[in-house]
Image (cartoon, rainbow, N blue to C red):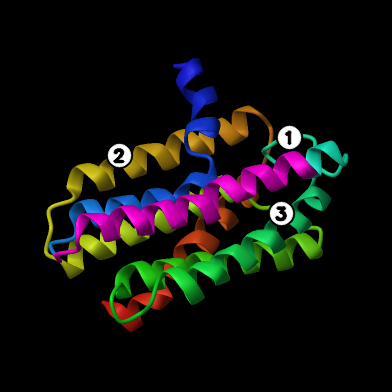
């Protein structure tokens, strides 16, 4: 059990969440999309939200601006979060659009506002759990997809509830966050997704 708790911080790293949400969307949506289009979109999203941020992290690490992938020091978060905001904007401007992919488009809008809020809090020297931000966002997105497409996604929702619990426990176990920072991270991830539902649900 201790191994599972420790592993949760790595398995549910917030960097995975935009791509994971996109992959889940294309897997469950009843709308038809040509397979080459799905692959192209997922590849573009993976490059902009996974591979480029990883390269940027190693650049910061080599420059001595980041010590670990968890960005434990609030000052280390400023450049990665700012850069990630730009990459999310690129996704919204070039890769996705509200007409063809309304659910996915507004999922990314919600993520953008969550990361923007996290960046502002980092400027104010307030550290929140980015793990909880990412997981809470995809949790709300899956619930919304279940309602919108009338899909039975109860197992996915239960899995995400367990993932939220394990991740919160893991962050407390590592003493990476206080309970307040975890709760704040959860709501900063959840509320923007709840707000953007008005535009596509």
Q: Residue at the spot x=44%, y=68% of the render?
A: 95
Q: State the quadrant of the N terminus.
A: top left
Residue depth check, mark 1 versus mark 2: number of the one nearer the observer? 1
Q: Mark number for residue 159? A: 2
**On the image, numbered disc 3 is attached to which residue?**
80
Which residues lie in the magenta part? 31-59
Residue reaching furthest to the front: 36
Q: Is residue 128 left or right of residue 19?
A: right
- Lower position in the chain sequence, tag 1 or tag 2: 1
Q: State the quadrant of the C terminus.
A: bottom left
Circle 1: element type? loop
**On the image, numbered disc 1 is attached to which residue?**
68
Q: Residue at the spot x=51%, y=51% of the render?
A: 47
Secondary structure that dominates the magenta span: helix
Above or below residue 3? Residue 144 is: below
Q: Is residue 117 left or right of residue 75?
A: left
Circle 3: element type? helix
Residue 164 pos. (x, y %)? 43, 42
Residue 60 pos. (x, y %)? 79, 44
Q: Mark number for residue 132? A: none
Above or below residue 104? Residue 155 is: above
Q: Answer whether residue 44 is visible to the viewer in this image.
A: yes
Q: Residue at the spot x=27%, y=42% of the render?
A: 158
Residue 74 pos. (x, y %)? 78, 50
């Amino acid at each position: 059990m201790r191994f599972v708790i420790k592993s949760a911080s790595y398995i549910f790293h917030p960097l995975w969440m935009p791509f994971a949400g996109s992959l889940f969307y294309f897997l469950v949506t009843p709308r038809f999309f040509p397979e080459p289009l799905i692959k192209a979109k997922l590849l573009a999203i993976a490059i902009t939200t996974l591979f480029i941020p990883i390269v940027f992290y190693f650049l910061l690490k080599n420059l001595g601006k980041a010590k670990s992938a968890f960005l434990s020091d609030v000052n280390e978060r400023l450049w990665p979060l700012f850069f990630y905001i730009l990459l999310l904007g690129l996704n919204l401007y070039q890769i996705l659009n509200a007409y063809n992919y309304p659910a996915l488009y507004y999922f990314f809008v919600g993520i953008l506002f969550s990361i923007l809020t996290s960046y502002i809090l980092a400027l104010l020297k307030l550290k929140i759990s980015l793990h909880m931000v990412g997981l809470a966002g995809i949790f709300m997105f899956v619930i919304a997809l279940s309602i919108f497409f009338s899909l039975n996604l109860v197992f996915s929702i239960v899995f995400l509830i367990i993932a939220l619990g394990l991740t919160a426990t893991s962050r407390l176990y590592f003493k990476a966050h206080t309970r307040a920072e975890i709760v704040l991270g959860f709501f900063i991830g959840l509320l923007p997704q709840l707000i953007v539902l008005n535009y596509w649900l």
